[in-house]
Image: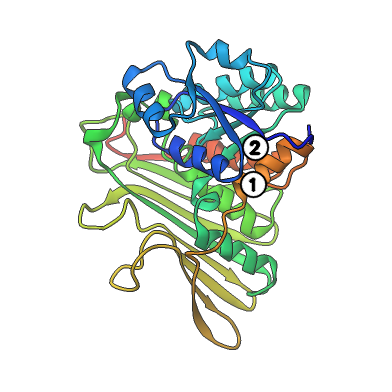
Amino acid sequence: MSNGKPVRFATVSVNHGHIYGQTNLLLNAGAELVSYYAAEPELAAEYGGRFPQARQARSEAEILEDPSIDLVISAGVPVDRAPLGIRVMRHGKDYMSDKPGFTTLAQLDEARRAQAETGRIYSIDYSERFENRATTKALELVRQGAIGAVVHTVGLGPHLRRFHTRAPWFFEREKFGGILTDIGSHQFDQFLSFAGATQAEIVAAQVANYHHPQYPEFEDFGDVMVRTGNASGYIRVDWFTPNGLDTWGDTRLTVVGSEGYIEVRKNIDIAGRPGSDHLFLVDQQSTRYIDCSQTPLPYGTQLVYDIQHRTETAMTQAHCFLASELALKAQAQATRLGHLQA
């Protein structure tokens, strides 16, 4: 498709606010937003107000059948994202989903088949990496050998509840997929990326509803041990961020290497430096702080390039699917604790 024309994209379903980050990644990369469709009038109005250059479509089909559109993006209800992606690919277009891209292993299997048959791109915006400058810088340093060979990662993904802003689907396990499927997918993406792994296994996993019995299908805590041939990792995700924090979560990543370690404080350095995108590097020579606030975010530009040239510079298709597979397997085998409904 590399003919000098910009990638044209459309949006279908805007049920999660992540859609705005997805859209801006592409606009900043020079892609052209053509149209959008949301079944909910209030959500459609909000999205259209933010991006008035786009035309509101009358239906999903109108977008899928538009031959001028190269890419469809979505942050629909999680259970609906994979079926939409499959329809998109079978209409000859590429697809970018918010995470989670799937809520069941059956959905993942069907998407893998459709992707192999069509040759289209099924991408997931793992925003804790793709939209975080400090994590982007950390991966760059690791690939340059700054801390030697990676032997362990710790990924922490605490989140602010804000239940009063959440739609009913947020509390229905069938629709959101479970805490490890959902916010845990970020952490599996990072583990594979930093370990340089193309395969991994779940060692142990658990999920819980410790403090919200009024939502019996909701999971407020989950953790996992994961390993590959050369490294292991620990993941913890939860919904216990207190309202007193100045951001939605004190998300952190620690990468331990044979010659040093990196700690990323993605959103906040509590009682420390202001702002976000903090990175601390300790090696055999020194301990130093790196301000990553100006580090470029390459995912949008790389995805646009991949659409134009049929390459895999943003991430390989195998990696995209494997990160989701690990999250889904961890969710399926997790021990269930607390007030969770069977």
What's the amino acid at mark 2?
Answer: Phe
Please provide percent x and percent y for residue 310.
Answer: 78, 36
Q: Which mark lies nearer to you, 2 or 1?
A: 1
- For label 1, the residue is 301
- In this rendering, the count of numbered labels is 2
Which residue appears at 60% of the width and 43% of the height? 323
Label 2: which secondary element: helix
Residue 160 percent coordinates (x, y): 29, 47
Image location of residue 294, percent across then percent down: 51, 64
Residue at image position (76%, 37%) is: 4
Element under label 1? helix
Say above or below: 100 vs 43.
Answer: below
Lower sequence index among marks 2 and 1: 1
Indicate the amino acid at tag 1.
Thr
* Circle on res. 321: 2
| Foreground residue among 213 and 163 | 163
> What residue appears at the point 61 percent right and 62 percent down from the top-left corner?
139
**Would residue 180 appear left or right of 130 to someone viewing this image?**
left
Residue 172, numbered circle = none
Q: Nearer the viewer, residue 124 or 60?
A: 60
- Return the residue nearer the eye: 36 or 184: 36
Instruction: Give the Cα separation between the discs numbered 2 and 1.
Output: 21 Å
